[in-house]
Amino acid sequence: MRYCLSWIVTAALFTSMACAADAAKSLQLSGKIDSVTVYRGQALVARVVELPAPGGLREIVVTDLPVQVVPGSLFAESADGTEVRSVLYRERAVSQDVREEVRKLDEQIRGVQDEQAANTRTLQTLAEQKTYLDRLSTFVAPTAQVELSKGVLNAETLKNLTTYQFEQRTKIADEELKLSKAGRDLGERLVILQRQRNELTGTSGRTVREAVVFASIPEKGGKLRLRYLVNNANWFPSYNVRAEAGAKQATLEYNASVQQQSGEDWGDVQMTLSTATPSLVAMAPALESLEVALASGAAVPASAAGYLKSKRQLEEQKEEYNTRRNADNKFGNMSINGAITGNGAGGQAAQLDADRGLNDVAGRMQVLEFQAKDWQRRDAKQAMQDETVSVTYQLANRTSLPSRQDMQLIQVATMQMPSEFYKLAAPVLSSYVYDQATLTNGGKMVLLAGPVASYLNGQFVGGGQVPTVAIGETFNVGFGIDSSLRATRELVEKTETVQAGNKVLNFNYHLTIENFGAKPATVRLTDRMPTSKDNDIKTTIESTSVALSTDASYLQRDRKKGILRWELQVPAQAIDTKASVVDFKLKLEFDRQMSIAGMPVQGK
């Protein structure tokens, strides 16, 4: 019985040692990048790591993490029966870069450097030869002089020595010229190679970055998913709009200009683009009470533009605190099965500090709202709304995006949009008449503000800007200048009178549209009348030779802002006296002790 027990204990000990030995055998794997979500400034990368049999407790070392990885963001998920126990991040130095393409560049750089060293050594040898020839010349000249005076000069020997010196100097000069050109070429090659290496790595890549995952693997093998944030990734929207003249539809190509210098290539991945902030914190920030007090001489924004500028600055600070809180990754992040990947104790203090910063900035924003006038907040509202839209786009097809310094263009979507084409003239601003179209976003995605390139009848006609457009909203796109049309504006008459203590100004304006083309055109002619926020200036349209537009959207929006609009039919070859004309009279009435002063343009 005692022997049997001893055998059992011994067997158990050997079994335990065997398990420990198996655990000590690390699996060196890199996995495959499966999906990437690109944010503004960062990207969330997901790798799938296939784990081979046999199973058991194993240490998996996921290698080749990029240089721009955010260490505290490592997050391991169990998958296919694998149970993750812990996740650690580590770095270790290596003799050469871990990436194949970088290693090849390093070899080329070393080859060029070796050639430069050989070039330098050859130049030194030539310099030594020149020094020898200088010494030989110094010896030959006095010796020849002495022999000549004694009448024993060997002319043939002197000739041979002289010829030899000049021939050698010529060869050395030619060789120095070749080596100088070669040295210049080698220097240029080295600069290009080093620039290519920097584009791939950003910094020195002689450090291996690894995630060490301790996990229980099923007997038949399994897999795990590793997620991490990387810096130096960003994207911006851009558009191409294509249409045929007079068509009822336009094609909008929604593109994303992506820049990623994370240090790793994203090959055949499912890509998502987002304007949200990546978050690895589940808890909402704690809201504290806000105390205010009365003070004399408090700084109050003087205009809507001043209010908007202060509001933007505070919004940027708030976003900075949120980014730090969500992505600083010091808060004890855990995998879904409880595997700790961060420092919880230090993280709590950092989270509390970020929460205090958020409350401070939010408090200053509220005080700014209390101080500002209502019209300042109202005028700034739309501009702030356009900047705070958060959207996410998942690309339909898998794509590849190498780590490069330049911007790379990928297509998000192609959409057919109903369009209404028209010609727009604003002679108060320009004599040109433009082709434009109102497009309706009938798709399933919000359009973010970005540049647009316009193509009409297959020809590039110019660029512009697309605003932020919600689903179902309309927006305007320009298609260039119609050179067959011209607009002019003339102040024909101005009178000034005084009535009931008020100054009254009367203006007569003459607007014309000339058509040099062979086809008639319908032109949307626009002008404006001044408006006053405090209603201390009374503005009236006394008369107009052509009735103002009755378009419902115009009457609801632009007309209330003082914009005047006419739909003008312009015949073909309508030039000079045949041009289409609009005459209108404008009346301004205000306190005669006052004078009209221009207000700064909104947003400046």
Image (cartoon, grey):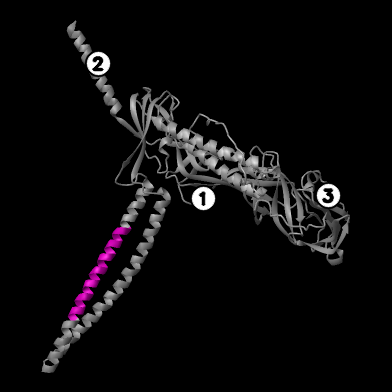
Residue 49 magenta-drawn? no
Please identify the quarter of the rendering in which residue 190 is found.
Answer: bottom left
Identify the residue position indicated by label 2 in the image.
12
Q: Is residue 78 visible?
A: yes
Residue type pointed to by label 1: Met
Q: Main secondary structure of the magenta part?
A: helix
Local crowd at mark 1 within 10 Å, few (<14), some, or many (≥20)? some
Task: Mark 2 vs mark 3: give the one in front.
Answer: 3
Estimate the spatial distance between the alpha carbons at disc 2 and disc 3, rounded to whole Å: 94 Å
Q: Which residue does the image show at 34% across and 41% down from the upper left?
A: 208
- Could you say where residue 50 lies in the image, as x and y percent from the top left? 40, 31
Identify the residue position indicated by label 1 in the image.
407
Q: Which tag, 3 or 1, sits closer to the chain's start?
A: 1
Estimate the spatial distance between the alpha carbons at disc 3 and disc 1, rounded to whole Å: 45 Å
Q: Is residue 226 left or right of residue 320?
A: left
Image vertical order of residue 487 relative to residue 364, above or below: below
Please identify the quarter of the rendering in which residue 498 is found.
Answer: bottom right
Identify the residue position indicated by label 3 in the image.
549
- Could you say where residue 147 lies in the image, as x and y percent from the top left? 12, 90
The reply to whether dot 1 and dot 2 touch (C-beta < 8 Å) is no
Which region of the structure is painted magenta?
Answer: 112-136
